[in-house]
Amino acid sequence: MNKIFVTRLPWATCKEALKTHFSQYGNIVDGYVVMDRVTKRSRGFGFITFENSESAQSAINADNEIGGRKLVVNQALHKGPEQQE
């Protein structure tokens, strides 16, 4: 799977900063920071989709830090129809 789940993002992290950081592991197809619908502020997590699973695994295995904050990076889980809103 090519998609990773990134948590513990600093509140000020935008999708461009997230994509720039993770581009060191490979080509990125998509990336975004999840925003609160009401406040329009970051919820502190996001997703990155790489072109291949090797890049995703490299990002998971590495120590990642943005803005002095250590990130938690895991494989993104696919939501089944019963889990989607």
Image (spheres, helix red, strand yellow):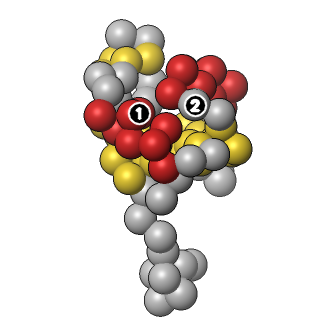
- The answer to whether 17 appears left or right of 2 in the picture is right
Which residue in the protein does label 2 denote? 26
Which circle, 2 or 1, is nearer the viewer?
2
Q: In which quarter of the image is the C terminus?
A: bottom right
For the residue carrying disc 1, how many other residues have a C-alpha within 10 Å: few (<14), some (14-19), or many (20+)?
many
| Kind of residue at disc 1 | Ala
The answer to whether residue 35 shows anywhere in this view is: no
Badge 1 marks a residue whose secondary structure is helix
The relative height of residue 50 versus residue 63 in the rendered view (above or below) is: below
Residue in the picture at 51% in, 27% down: 25
Question: Horizontal and vertical percent for residue 59?
Answer: 41, 33
Question: Horizontal and vertical percent for residue 51?
Answer: 63, 45
Question: Horizontal and vertical percent for residue 82?
Answer: 47, 89
Q: Do the residues labelled 2 and 1 touch (CB within 8 Å)?
A: yes
- The answer to whether 3 appears left or right of 71 in the picture is right
Residue in the picture at 38% in, 53% down: 75
Q: Quadrant of residue 16?
A: top right
| Kind of residue at disc 2 | Gly
Question: Horizontal and vertical percent for residue 45?
Answer: 46, 42
Which residue in the protein does label 1 denote? 59
- The answer to whether 22 appears left or right of 9 in the picture is right
